[in-house]
Amino acid sequence: MDKKANLMEGIGRTWLLLKRYGRKMISEMNMGLTFDQMLVLFALEKNEGMKIGDIAELTDRDRTTTSRMISGLERKNYLLRVASREDNRQKLIYLTQAGRDILDGLAPMKEDFIKILFKGISTADIEKTAEIVFKVAKNLEEF
């Protein structure tokens, strides 16, 4: 197998294993949340005030599924929909304090997860790999 195909296979396998490990960890924590709901919370942690369509694109879900996930998180008081100032019909999604508290509680788990992921890998290798993966992602975004 050529090196490019090997890299593509490695990226795909890594994503599948990340999802599997993430689902297992969340299930074991008995938080009443799914892996996909956690992805929504993590996305909002980095960029609050996103539109449902933007969250759907970021989490690779359709708008209907994303809207249902957001409704479920809203019922648990982790999220809040707020009308956009520019367009009252458009709703922006924000974390509530309870949502922030959940994410704060997950911080130690995230740190442990990162330690497991990058065990035995040098900082230089991590930086170079991140640079390459982001270049690949940029190429796909332009496609």
Image (cartoon, grey):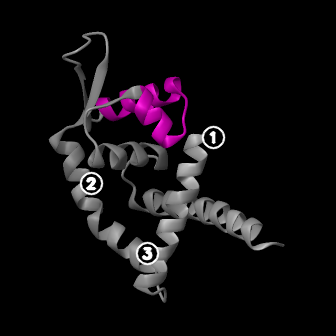
Q: The C terminus lies in which quarter of the figure?
A: top right
Disc 3 target residue = 127
Residue at 30% x, 29% y is 75
Marks 1/2: CA–CA distance: 34 Å
Give SS at disc 1: loop
Give how far across and how far down residue 82 sits, in percent.
Answer: 22, 22
Q: Residue furthest left?
A: 97
Tell me the kind of residue under disc 2.
Answer: Leu
Measuring from the top left, give residue 100's x and y in whole percent: 21, 48
Mark 2, residue position: 103
Above or below for 30 versus 68 = below
Q: In the image, residue 114 lies at what x, y percent?
A: 40, 73
Whichever of callouts 1 and 3 sits on the residue coming sooner in the sequence is 3
Most foreground residue, 95 or 56: 56
Crowd band around label 3 with a 10 angstrom C-alpha radius: few (<14), some (14–19), many (20+): few
Q: Identify the secondary structure beneath mark 2.
A: helix
Between marks 1 and 3, how big is the CA–CA gap? Answer: 25 Å
Q: Which residues are magenta?
A: 53-75
Return the residue at label 1.
143
Query: Which residue is at 46% across, 77% downward?
Result: 126
Tell which tag, 1 or 2, sits nearer the viewer: 1
Which residue does the image show at 25% across and 33% down from the upper left? Answer: 49
> Would you say residue 29 sits in the magenta stretch?
no
Where residue 30 sits, quadrant-wise, is: bottom left
Q: Horizontally, is 130 left or right of 85 in the view?
A: right
The label shown at residue 27 is none
Q: Amino acid at mark 1?
A: Phe
Q: Is residue 33 among the parts visible in the rendering?
A: no
Q: Is residue 104 above or below residue 71?
A: below
Question: Which picture quadrant has residue 105?
Answer: bottom left
What SS does tag 3 mark? Answer: helix
- On the image, the x and y values in percent for residue 48 come to 25, 39
